Amino acid sequence: MWSSIRTAWTIFLHMFRRRVTIQYPEEKPYIPPRWRGRIILSRDPDGGERCVACYLCAVACPVDCISLQATEDEHGRRYPEFFRINFSRCIFCGYCEEACPTYAIQLTNDFEMGEYDRQNLVYEKEDLLIDGPGKYPEYNFYRVAGLAIGGKDKGEAENEAPPVDLKRLLP
Amino acid sequence: MATIFIDQERHTARDGENLLQECLALGYDLPYFCWHPALGSVGACRQCAIKQFKDEHDTRGKIVMACMTAVREGARISIHDAEASAFRASVIEWLMINHPHDCPVCDEGGECHLQDMTVMTRHVYRRYRGRKRTFRNQDLGPFVNHEMNRCIQCYRCVRFYRDYAGGRDLDAHALRNHVYFGRHADGVLESEFSGNLVEVCPTGVFTDKTLKRHYTRKWDLQSAPSICVHCALGCNTVPGARQGTLRRIHNRYNGAVNGYFLCDRGRYGYEFVNAPTRIRTPLMRRQRGEALRAATRQEVLAQWRALVDRGAKPIGIGSPRASLEANFALRTLVGAQRFHLGVSDAEHTLLESALALLRESPARVASLREAEGADAVLVLGEDVTNTAPMLALALRQSVRQTHMKIATKLHIPHWDDAAVREAAGSAKAPLFVAAPIATKLDEVATRVFHDAPDEVARLGFAVAGAIEGRKAHRVPDTSDATQALADEIAQALVAAERPLIVSGCGSQSVELLRAAASVAAALCAKGHSAQITFALPECNSGGLALIEGKRLGAAIEALRNGDADTLIVLENDLYRRAGQAAIDALFESAHQVVVIDHTASATSARADIVLPAGTFAESDGTLVNNEGRAQRYFQVFVPNGDVQGSWRWARDLLAAADRGREGDWANLDAIIGACAAAIPALAQIVNAAPGAGFRLAGQKIAREPPRYSGRTALYANVNVHEVQVPADPDSPLAYSMEGYPGEPPPPLIPWFWAPGWNSVQSVNKFQAEIGGALRGGDPGVRLIEPAGADGGAHFDTVPQRFAPRVGAWLLIPLHHIFGSEELSALAPGVRELAPQPYVALNPDDADMLGLAAGELACVDLDPAPCRLLVTRRADLRRGMAGVPVLPWLHFAALPAFAKITKAEASRVEAE
Ligand code: SF4
Ligand code: SF4
Ligand code: SF4
Ligand code: SF4
Ligand code: FES
């Protein structure tokens, strides 16, 4: 009996507490920046496509909803010919972002992706690629890697010595 | 066998083998780089360090290299010893100092031995902050990509390329930490085995350039056990497919056949599967003169039905590049009496003779592994580098048998590669090469002999006679020099423990085959255990010969005299089999022509009905190699549309003709069973691989690795609802990543992988003994075993001496590894390396004709005289000329005499 009255009293007091439920969608909630929402592909600081088509996100994905095909431009820079995410399967676990060695694939704090037709949840590269570096403004994989690409020859990456001159006989 | 203790645990290991190999064989994970089971140990990388203890009281021990230390009775070692582990971790750390930050863009990634070893030694954190050394790369041709920054200086590449495969143009350049592995300058790698660098190099320095164009990681490849279709040796392969295209060919270890390696034709010929020349839909025309148009399956079968209703009398032409099942299905469709082999008449005779000679020979037909172990070899009339490339690689090892003998005498272990080579110096086991023209094997031969095919055959008979030692069997009119050579060869063969005689169909001479068989028979008669092997023309020539059928000429005859009016051609371009006029006439006398093939050809262009067949990657079947080994290949991926295995088309044609009961083959097992029952010689093919009902723990074997990615996205653009995984009624393999997680039986291994071993090095985990047979036995069943009886000598058929003619030259076929085989020649990389059409002449003959190199000669040959560029070859005797075997050059049967004159015009018409 006493406990029932105490419960009723507690509930009564709640009427005067701050309200948590909001009137979505008229009112937008606060989403922290590290929220795992809609996935995007970013660009490196000099504007090139960041994804190098290494397939690591695809293999890390527990529901196998990422697929792509690697290709190369005429100077040897790797990029995905197509890049597809089937968001109707994605569980927003963020494993792809963790696996990505280039910070290309990132989860954002947008979650408003509802569709009436499941087919519309299949995103291609055009739908995924944004114009900036996203959460990681600095990193530029090709400036660190040893592969030569257009505009960056052998020996021009970070911490690289100029290419060895094989004809030199000095010790 | 010796008892050894590894980390206090008692094991038995093979006495005298190296500890690294034995540790791996016992299931331990011990990292290594420079050791390779086929190349031996050199102790260069220091990665395989272990602790060795003097006895059970020794607690300090000393660090030794496992690959350089022999197994001794009672040896005590430790792999997990803290000092040894730290040593190995620091070796990796050094190797990694200059290593580029490349894994995401490196084609080796995911199957990289360096990655595996780095993980195995737990080197996880980069401490070095200095500058990394860099190199420039080279363009090494259409097959191998070069990215030198990734090198860890293990020297495996040059040891394989130079020491094992005999290449010269790849070497280690420069010195100290600048050592560079490449050519002296950019250029196509000369060795026919260069593609193996991709697998031998433990890093991403050498990678597959054709794979790069449609790059896929190993974990994303759907694979199945397969057999190379580009020559008759039947090397085992792992083709990998993704999204309906074939992406690459990798080696599939078979201890008795190809071991760890493949030739470049076999590795890079696969692109014909993706080529625009593929036939992908049924085609038909209602009337002659109309163009072929795409049709539905129902339409073509209805047209066939109408033919049958009109009382068509079909005959069938099979193919040496189609499976046993496909040929047998066609044979069932048309009847055994109306089945023709689909090879030229000359080749028919050759195949029949080759088979008969092998069957009656008391000598064993050598497998490739046995050829490697031969300690004296006679090659009669065959350019094996170009017709059976991996046999050439095996023969290059055979000359090292002397090294092994010397090493044994000096108590040097056979795996101590540098020491064995140092001790043996230039000693070589005897290898005699007799051929119409210089071959690449000449460079390792003891003696070479270049003359007309008949003369080479005569030399063979002279050798046989010398071995027999009977006056009656001396070859008449033999020059003293030739007789002396014959005696020398005979002596070497008699002195050997495992002599091998090699010949083949390349020179198109039955006498050569007989001569080879006679040498082998003579050796056997003297009590030597001789072996023999013939290079056959195509991947299933052996199987076709076992099926038996009529000659091509009989088909032409039957159509001409009205015994038949409908022609069914299976996977064959008949224009390669006889003169153009004869084949044109064949098609004209046939009322209807049905072609079942996967690749468009001059023949499919003449067809009224074309049925799209599956290539080796899109169908299952059995091939019989030159050893008489029946081996099964399994479908790698499911093709789109109506493409299906040829035997299924034959079954559908039977069903459409209301004869479904004759071809009542529910699946592959059913037709294999029917074939084995109908043809006694093929009774054993059932045992080549487990049947479709085979299960391990109730499960099928997955074609896709467990990490196969993109399952719910790959085709989501077409339909977001995933389609069901296709069923496979034909094999115990599944088109899925789900399946038995353990080790499948050898004929069913779809890819090599073991926990912690993502690279090809994982094959160690599948072998009973490292470098020996796969656990459970090497795949394939041998259909030809030596006849116990004496006989097999044919002294009655010694050919006459070659007589040059005035004004005419004996034109002989010259084979090229790149270009001479029909299917691989459709792969762009192979086509790039194929020769331009040419005619080779002795310089004296060329001078007589007033022809300089590069000028045009007019060769008067059926179907029409053609102009060919002149190549001067001093190794070609006078009176003979050579032309390349190329699918796009249609010559009448060779060898033949032809007039050669200097051409007036300066235009090449041959193309
Ligand atoms: S992991 Fe990153 S770089 Fe690699 S394929 Fe995915 S998005 Fe591209
Ligand atoms: S060789 Fe291996 S470790 Fe080196 S970049 Fe390539 S995948 Fe990575
Ligand atoms: S190129 Fe490859 S095989 Fe050759 S030394 Fe370097 S890492 Fe070893
Ligand atoms: S030797 Fe013949 S069977 Fe072997 S890989 Fe080369 S072409 Fe294929
Ligand atoms: S594998 Fe033993 S030293 Fe290289």
Image (tube, coloured by chain):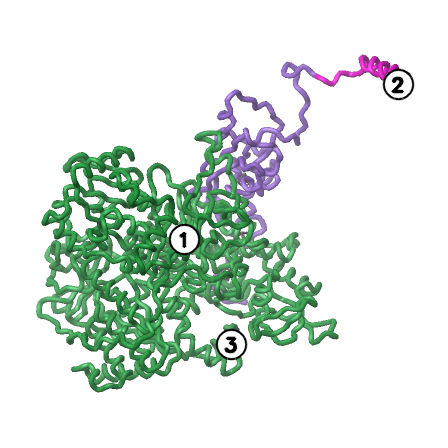
Chain colours: A purple, B green
The Cα–Cα distance between marks 1 and 2, rounded to whole angstroms, is 76 Å
Both labels 1 and 2 in a single chain = no
Q: The disc numbered 1 marks a residue on which chain? A: B
Q: Secondary structure at mark 1?
A: strand
Nearest the eye: A61 or B333: B333
Q: Please say whether residue A155 is visible from this viewpoint.
A: no
Number of the label disc, if any, that sits on residue A3: 2
- Residue B349 spot, x, y in % from top left: 20, 63
Q: Secondary structure at mark 3?
A: helix
Residue type indicated by callout 1:
Ser
Q: Is residue B138 left or right of residue B858?
A: right
Label 2 beta carbon within 8 A of ligand 1: no
The residue identified by callout 1 is B226
The Cα–Cα distance between marks 3 and 2, rounded to whole angstroms, is 91 Å
- Residue B430 spot, x, y in % from top left: 36, 78
User: From which residue to which does the magenta span run?
Assistant: A2-21
- Residue B376 spot, x, y in % from top left: 36, 77
Q: Quadrant location of residue B665?
A: top left
**Residue extending furthest toward the front:** B661
| Residue A10 on the magenta segment | yes
Query: Measured along the vertical axis of the image, is residue B535 above or below residue B686?
Result: below
Q: Please say whether residue B159 is visible from this viewpoint.
A: yes
Q: Is residue B52 left or right of residue B466?
A: right
| Residue B529 on the magenta segment | no
Q: Residue at x 53, y 81 (%)?
A: B411
